[in-house]
Amino acid sequence: MRYSLYGLVLLALCGFPALGEEAPPVVPVAEQAAVAAAAAAQPATDKAKVVIEAPEEPVPPGQLVILDAQQSIGDQFLWSANLPLPAPVGNWAVDSGGRLVHFATPLTPGQYAWTLTVLKTAPPVSADQQQVVIVVGAPLPPPPLPRLLLSVRDVKIAESAGVGATSGIVRCEAPVAEALTVTLTVPADMPLRVPATVAIAAGEQAIGFIVDVVDDQVLTGDREVTIEAAATGYEAANVAVTVTDDEQTPVPPVVLGLVLTPTTVREGVASEAKVTRQGGNPAEALVVMPTTSDATEATVPASVIIPAGQAEATFAVTSLADSEVDGPQSVQITVACAGEHTPATAALIVQDADAIIEVTAMWGIAVYESGDVAKYGPTAAQVITGTRLRELNPKFTWLPADRDTLDEAGQVPADIKPWLLLVQDDSLELPYLFLVDQNGRIAWQGKLPESVDAVIAEVQKHLK
C-alpha cells in the first residue's frame, strides 16, 4: 500500500491501521488541504525534515551500502524502494529506529532508488519526503554525440595541382536546428590548405569547401595528409588525402666498365666483351653503344642492352682477317650510352695471321722480365747462343731482350719494338717467345719452353 504525503500526515494524526485492518475512512479533500496548510504554517524547526547521508557515487562494486537518516527530524520513518531498479528483496533492512538502512550483501552494479518519508506526530503534525539514488559500479555512459561526416572528391592529388586541387563536404546526420560552425584543420607542415571554418546553415545538413595544394619544391616523397572536421556537441570526423610529390629523386650518372677476354686474339678470332654499369636507374634497361677505333681490324655490334634489373651484359668483339701483312694491331674498344655517363675503354691486340709462312728466315724473339735474361738459367744461356738453332737454318736469328731493352739512344730497338709492345700490359706470362717469319708475321707464340730441345722442336715445325 502506498500513501501520498498528505495521506501519511493524516495517518499520523489518526493512527496507522494494523496489518489486516481496514484503512480509515477517506478524509475529504478540503480537510486534507486544511491539514497541509496547517503543517506548512509551522516554524521550520517544528517541522519534519528528511536528511539522508548516502555514499558518494559511484559506489565501488563489492562495498556494503548504508543509508543514514539519523539527522532527520521526526519520530516515524518509512523507507520504500522504488524505480528505476529496486533493491533485491531481503537484501536490506532498517534498524529499530528506522533511521539506518543496512545491506546484507554488496549490491550488484546498477542504479537503485529509495524514498524516505519522515513523520512528526506530535502536534503540530508534519511530514517530509526525499528520494535517494545510489549508483553502484561505473556511472552510466553519456549518450553518444551526433557524428560529423567528412569526405573529399579525390583521395589522391598531385602536389602541382595548386588552387582548387579538390573539394570536400562536411555533413551532419540530420539537418541542424541552428547554424553550426565547423572547424577544419590540417597539420601545419603538410601541403594541403582548407578554410579555417565553414558554417552549416539552420535547416541544412551539409556544406562544401575547397582544398588547395602548395608545391613546396622539396623532395619529400608522397605524403598522407589528414583533414579533420570538428564542431561543439558533435563527434569529430577526418579523411586522409595522399599528395604525390612532383620532385624526382636525382639519378646518379651511369659509370660503365668494360673487360675483354682474352685481350689478344689472332685475326678472325672473337674476344668476349663484358660491359657493366653502376649508377643510373637499375630498374630500367640500358642501351649501350660499343665502338671500335679500327673497324678494319675488329668489329662490334651497334648496340647492346643491359636488361632491367641486371648490372652487366656481354657481346662479341670480332677480329678481321684483312689479308694484309701488318703485324700485331692494337684496337681500342669503347662503350658509351645516352645521358650523363662515364664511358669505358679496353684494348684488344689483333695478331697478324696472313699467308703461309715463308720460313727461309725466322726470328726467335724471347722477351724476359727486366734484367732476367741471364737469370733464366743454363737452358736459356744455351738457347741464347743459338748455335744449334743456327745449324737448323743459317738465317735463323735469335733476339733475346728484356721488357725494358733500350738501345744506345735510349729507344726500344725497332726490330723488337712491336713485340715488346705486346707484353706491356702484363697479359703474357714472361719469359715469352715469338717465332716470326721474314715478313714479320707470327709463326708461333707462347711461354718460352724450358729446354733447348723444346725450343728447337717448336722451331723445326716451321722450318722447311
Image (cartoon, helix red, strand yellow):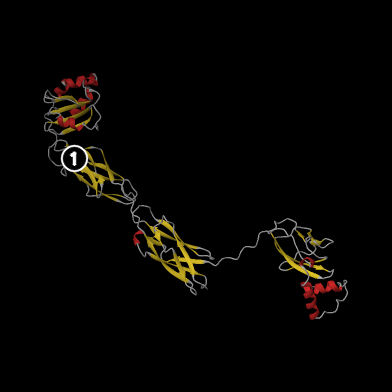
In percent of width and height, residue 4 lies at 77, 74
Identify the residue under disc 1.
331
Figure quadrant of residue 54: bottom right
Residue 299 seen in render: no
Residue at (84%, 70%) from the top-left corner? 123
Residue 415 seen in render: yes
Query: What quarter of the picture does the C terminus occupy?
Result: top left
Above or below, 233 against 21 in this view is: above
Residue at (84%, 62%) from the top-left corner? 97
Residue at (74%, 67%) from the top-left corner? 130
Observer-nearest of 365 and 152: 152
Observer-nearest of 248 and 292: 248
Query: What quarter of the picture does the N terminus occupy?
Result: bottom right
In percent of width and height, residue 382 lies at 20, 19
Observer-nearest of 250 and 289: 250
In percent of width and height, residue 305 lies at 28, 50
Above or below, 388 against 264 in this view is: above
Above or below, 416 against 326 in this view is: above
Check the image and name the residue furthest to the top: 378
In percent of width and height, residue 119 lies at 81, 68
Q: Name the side, left or right, on which 127 lies relative to 428.
A: right
**What's under tag 1, amino acid-wise?**
Val
